[in-house]
Image (cartoon, rainbow, N blue to C red):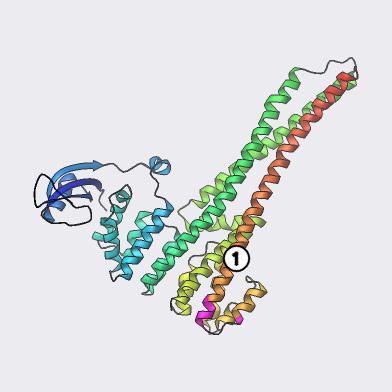
């Protein structure tokens, strides 16, 4: 695909082409429009407008932000992306093809997001499909795109768009939940590490500079041993902190990898941690159960709903669960039997066995999704509490050993040693 540049063009036309049209005060009967065009060069952009019947009055070249600028200043919010999906869904429900709906939504955007959207628009104009054009934006996670791809392949893209909107919204809630837990943990770690650094390079160094003055060699040696022990403990804690931070960075890089297998390996590592395992599995199962419930309630066949829903699971354990359900369904087992797996609790299996039709099954799955989301919320809270207590113990050890040295020094001084 040729490198494109973005141009904001103001032009006059004898009629209103879009919602940006405003009556031109200086030229009766004409309307002033504004459009953002992606083109290889300015002349091509101007020609594009002229072919519409417009008279170009101003052209501004728009520079797309660099990677770092987008990261800190020009990031497209999840709220905008969610509303973007909703707008696509509304247009498709109104009867437009997915490709035409995407084109209409892009052409209606004139803000910062248009610079990124023009890449997708150019892909559409070159014959790319709907989902392919969305992938070029790099706005949506693999799970959301998987739902859309499956819907496109099954010929149910309209229902998949509605499902993707809800799925993406719930994904935002999950991200907020995890981000909140991780943010508090990182804050606790920073406070704890700063305490250790203060002890190691502040108090302990001062104690080393001001050794105990005593005529009793045994007492002096006892004091030196206490100082050395406190120093070694603090050094050990700092080494542990360094390794722990490196592990967090490594996991973060794995999560941001473009390779699905790398991310899968990262999720497998995270699932070995008890509280994070509960958080991940509950969130993933809740999201996928809600997707399937929504599809079933919308009249999509069970097996088609299953194919679409399972693609939204990010937890490897939950992926295996859905694979087992699919395998059982494909050999002819009814849903009441296909869901009879240990990944679900006995009460959840009991509820599913009691359903009598697709509508009731949708209600069952929605109920399980709600319960699992509540469990994810509780796991996030427990994780934050665990991290807080752990950081207190971590910094408490450093403070304790340092204060023991101070106490020993004061006792010796007061006893006149």
Horizontal side of 220 relative to 235 (left or right) equals right
Left or right: where does residue 348 sit relative to residue 264? right
Residue at coordinates 46% horizontally, 60% vertically from top-left? 169
Q: Residue at x 67, y 49 (%)?
A: 385
401 w.r.t. 22: above or below? above
Which residue shows up at 38% across the image and 61% down it? 85
Give the quadrant of residue 153.
bottom left
Question: Hey, which residue is sitting farthest left in the picture?
Answer: 28
Where's residue 218, x and y in %?
A: 90, 22
Q: Say above or below: 286 vs 391.
A: below
Judged by its main secondary structure, the magenta piece is helix
Residue stretch in magenta: 353-362
Mark 1 closeness class: few <14, some 14–19, many ≥20 residues within 10 Å: many
Residue 384 x/y as whole percent: 64, 49
Q: Position of residue 401 (x, y in %)?
A: 78, 32
Residue drawn at the location 77% of the way across and 34% of the way down: 400
414, above or below 350, in the image: above
Which image quarter is the C terminus in?
top right
Question: What x and y, as percent, mark residue 216?
Answer: 90, 17
**Which residue is identified by label 1?**
372
Of residue 390 and residue 91, the one placed in the foreground of this image is 91
Mark 1 element type: helix
What is the quadrant of residue 147 in the picture? bottom left
Judge from the rendering whether residue 217 lies leftward or rightward of residue 278; answer left or right.
Answer: right
């Amino acid at each position: 695909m040729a490198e494109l540049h973005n141009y904001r063009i103001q032009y006059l036309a004898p009629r209103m082409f879009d919602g940006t049209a405003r009556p031109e005060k200086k030229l009766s009967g004409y309307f002033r429009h504004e459009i953002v065009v992606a083109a290889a060069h300015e002349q091509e952009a101007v020609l594009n407008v002229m072919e519409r019947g417009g008279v170009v009055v101003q052209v501004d070249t728009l520079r797309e932000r660099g990677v770092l600028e987008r990261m800190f200043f020009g990031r497209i919010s999840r709220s905008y992306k969610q509303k973007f999906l909703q707008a696509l869904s509304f247009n498709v429900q109104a009867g437009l093809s997915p490709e035409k709906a995407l084109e209409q939504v892009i052409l209606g955007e004139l803000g910062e997001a248009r610079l990124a959207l023009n890449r997708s628009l150019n892909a559409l104009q070159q014959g790319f499909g709907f989902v392919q054009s969305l992938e070029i934006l790099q706005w949506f996670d693999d799970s959301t795109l998987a739902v859309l791809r499956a819907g496109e392949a099954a010929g149910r893209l309209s229902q998949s768009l509605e499902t993707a909107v809800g799925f993406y919204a719930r994904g935002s809630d999950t991200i907020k939940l995890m981000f909140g837990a991780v943010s508090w943990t990182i804050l606790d770690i920073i406070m704890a590490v700063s305490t250790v650094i203060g002890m190691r390079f502040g108090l302990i160094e001062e104690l080393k500079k001001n050794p105990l003055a005593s005529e009793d060699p045994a007492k002096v040696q006892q004091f030196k041993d206490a100082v050395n022990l406190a120093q070694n403990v603090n050094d050990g804690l700092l080494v542990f902190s360094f390794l722990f931070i490196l592990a967090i960075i490594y996991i973060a890089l794995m999560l941001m990898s473009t390779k699905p297998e790398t991310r899968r390996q990262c999720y497998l590592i995270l699932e070995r941690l008890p509280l994070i395992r509960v958080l991940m599995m509950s969130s993933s199962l809740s999201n996928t159960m809600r997707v399937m419930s929504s599809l079933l309630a919308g009249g999509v066949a069970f097996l088609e709903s299953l194919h679409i829903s399972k693609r939204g699971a990010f937890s490897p354990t939950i992926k295996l669960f859905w694979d087992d359900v699919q395998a059982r369904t494909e050999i002819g087992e009814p849903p009441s039997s296909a869901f009879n797996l240990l990944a679900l609790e006995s009460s959840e299996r009991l509820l599913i066995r009691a359903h009598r039709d697709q509508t009731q099954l949708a209600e069952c799955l929605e109920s399980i999704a709600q319960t699992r989301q509540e469990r994810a919320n509780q796991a996030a809270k427990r994780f934050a509490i665990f991290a807080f207590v752990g950081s207190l113990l971590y910094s408490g050890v450093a403070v304790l050993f340092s204060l023991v040295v101070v106490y020993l020094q004061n006792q010796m001084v007061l006893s006149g040693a």
